[in-house]
Image: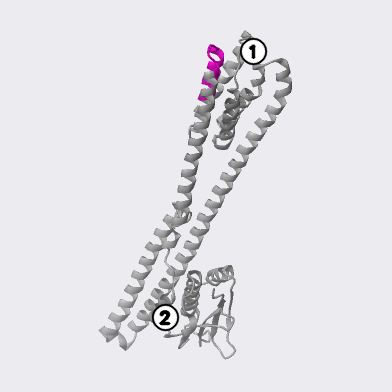
Amino acid sequence: MDVQGARLDRVQSVSGCLFRVVAGGCTALFLLLNVFGLHSEPASLLLVAVAAVGATAALLPGRDRAGALVAAVPSLAMTLIIQFWDVPVQGPSVLIELPALLVLLGRIVWRSQPPVLLPLAGFVGFTVVVLPLRGSTIAMVVLTAPLAVLVAVAVGAGLYLRAVDARRARALADARRDERLDLARDLHDFVAHHVTGIVVQAQAARFTAGTAAAQDPERLDRMLGDIEAAGTEALTSMRRMVGLLRDAQDGGAADGHAGRRPVGGLDQVEELVARFAHPPATLSLDPGLGTLPPEVATSVHRVVQEALTNARKHAADATAVHVGAARLADGSIEVAVRDDGRGRGGRRLPSGGFGLAGLGERVEAIGGRLTAGPRPEGGWEVVAVIPGT
């Protein structure tokens, strides 16, 4: 969670506590005034106690089911006692008891699970609707319908809050899923790049073993060292990306931890091109690029990585690969990877993946466009134009 979100949560928590303190103080003062005005009315004093219990249950956070039962059972019992035993009562404590029951009803509908939701909500709602039985028949006829409307409003408020929570939970799950998918695509990019390099270098070593160059220990050692380095980089990338994938699954995306995700920048592009030796690659960066936004820098890195991987797979006869990044007149960034291969002497490497398709989706997601195809003068090119801001 970021600092701003943490501050907002603290503000909401403090404001909620202040509201409960103020509401509880006003309620206590009102009930005390009721007590002082009812010197020798046991039933009325008992109603004040019932209202105090209901207000306490409504103001205390959590334990909605227990609070609802603690408030509704005595309230309904007092209503039945007053109705069937004709006990005289007076005092306006019902003005506290009624809102407390409605608040508890709304919280039950909001937070309770389906097995207990309907019976508990129905019990509290029934308790509210029959409150007019404590008075006269006229009061019962006049007030039952308005109380039923208040019950419906409380139920509606609880359902609305329940829907908001469900929508937030779905958005959270979608965010986590999207982050996991994004990390999985990055894992594919990293591993495909490194494993392709391993296969190419292994094929070169096998070819060298059948020639006179096999007698050159230094050359063979260099080839085997390159294979070892590429394998180590692949394992490191896999461990890092799988670790991030687990973090995202545990809620890192939703808690703002996605910022730990490695972002490929221009420095990583330079390292990527410097390590690319089959065929040799050169890099030219426009001095006017400046500092790029993280999503732009990441996309530049992915474009170069995927294009170099494809060149290594499908342009075995290429003698050079040129990588360039420049800022256009409209402020966008053009990334181009071009080779001079003719498509002959292809290697036996697996193809048919979704690297360019996924890369196109990534570039389009930030408002850019990606093109790939043969060059008029020969060779292949991958060109991406990405908004620079």
Q: Which residue is mark 1?
A: 83
Q: Is residue 224 above or below residue 139?
A: below
Q: Which residue is mark 2?
A: 273
Residue 268 within the magenta-colored segment of the rendering: no
Residue placed most toward the observer, 351 or 105: 105
> Tag 1's secondary structure?
helix
Residue placed most toward the observer, 223 or 90: 90
Residue 221 in the figure: left or right of residue 178: left
Q: Is residue 45 above or below residue 105?
A: above
| Residue extent of the magenta highlight | 37-52
Residue placed most toward the observer, 15 or 103: 15
Residue placed most toward the observer, 350 or 94: 94
Q: Nearer the viewer, mark 1 or mark 2?
A: 1
- For residue 246, which quarter of the picture? bottom left
- Locate residue 165, reporting x and y percent: 56, 44
- In whole angstroms, how far apart are the C-alphas of marks 1 and 2? 88 Å
- Locate residue 60, reporting x and y percent: 48, 33
How many neighbours does mark 2 have within 10 angstroms: few (below 14), some (14-19), or many (20 or more)? some
Task: State which quarter of the image contains the N terminus.
Answer: bottom left
